[in-house]
Amino acid sequence: MSAKASLKAAKSAIDAKKWDEAIEQANSVLEKDANNYFAKLFIGRAQDGLGRLDSAAQAYSDATKIKPQDPQAWLGLRGLYQKQGRAKVDERIDVELQLAHIYAELDDAHKAQVAIDGLVDQARKHGTKLQYARALSTQLPTSPIYSYLEGRLPHPAATYTRIAEIHEAEEASTIKRLIDERRLRLGATLENTTLQVKNEVYAASPLEDVYQSIIDWTNDDALRREYEEKLLLRAYDTLLVLPSGSKEQKREKVMKLAHDMVIIKHPYLLAWQIELEWRSGLAIEAH
């Protein structure tokens, strides 16, 4: 039987839900042409029908390598990961983002937006908070799809604000958990443990950058002032837990943030204290 005839037979078997027959016909094509795109697609669909989700994912993934710009194999992966919910949130994000790129190249803004909306919705419903934050980041100006979908996506300030809220809550929870775990270690003190944990968490935190992005993007003056205060407070708190000898760059940032607030007479007490006291010669080690 020719490859064309075998592919037609595989398609008919899939339509009839004769999954094993479909796989057999598709494999006969692959014996002659190991990179036959449609044979891989049909195997993916048949393995899915048999409930062999890992095998189906492998077949679809193989197909994406053969024709990376064709949406069909990516759509197969989307379906697989969608039905697996929380187990495949990160994989779904990757696939939907790839589909968004493909549809952008095809100038199909609606389908590109559906892909982005789908990955955000999946992460919101089934993912962790940090997975949800990652999904939201695909709607930001830093996302490679943003320039194509600009105007169809939420305003960046709103998205950055939601991401900030997620990281704030997650970091507070992480700090509390780590302090509780470590404070009972031999020789540990609550003060030293707290400093160590905060230094670790703050060092890995994206919050200062997120706060700055809210400040840069928002059109709401009240929101901008709120996040200018949050940015200064986070930078200041980070400075306090940095080890001696590592403070200079952060100290300069804190002083600039405080000075910028004072210049516009923003009534934030911490900014005025820093401006008045630090510029009078008090060393950071005294704080």
Image (cartoon, rainbow, N blue to C red):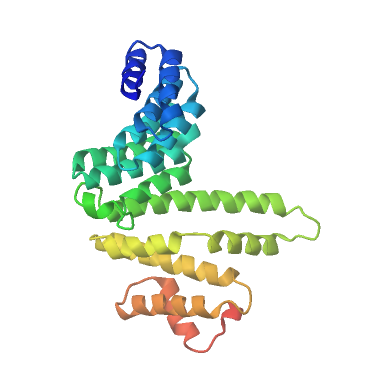
Horizontal placement of 47 versus 113: left or right? Answer: right
- Toward the bottom, the furthest residue is 281
Nearest to the observer: residue 67 or residue 281:
67
Image coords of residue 260 (percent x, y)? 35, 78
Q: Is residue 138 above or below residue 188?
A: above
Q: Nearer the viewer, residue 133 or 58?
A: 58
Q: Residue furthest right?
A: 186
> In the image shown, does 183 or 78 lie closer to the viewer?
78
Is 162 positioned to the left or the right of 152 in the image?
A: right
Quick check: 48 above or below 151? above
What is the quadrant of residue 245 in the picture?
Answer: bottom right
Whether residue 79 is visible here, answered yes or no, is: no
Is the C terminus in the top left, top right, bottom left or bottom right quadrant? bottom right
Q: Residue at x 45, y 44 (%)?
A: 131
Residue 201 falls in image quadrant = bottom right
Residue at the (55%, 48%) spot, across then down? 173
Q: Residue at x 52, y 67 (%)?
A: 237
Q: Nearer the viewer, residue 88 or 201?
A: 88
Position in image of residue 228 (x %, y %) = 36, 67
Question: In the drawing, does residue 154 fall left or right of residue 17?
Answer: left
Residue 9 seen by the camera: yes
Tell me where residue 54 appears, x and y as whole percent.
Answer: 51, 29
Q: Residue 122, image x and y in percent?
A: 39, 35
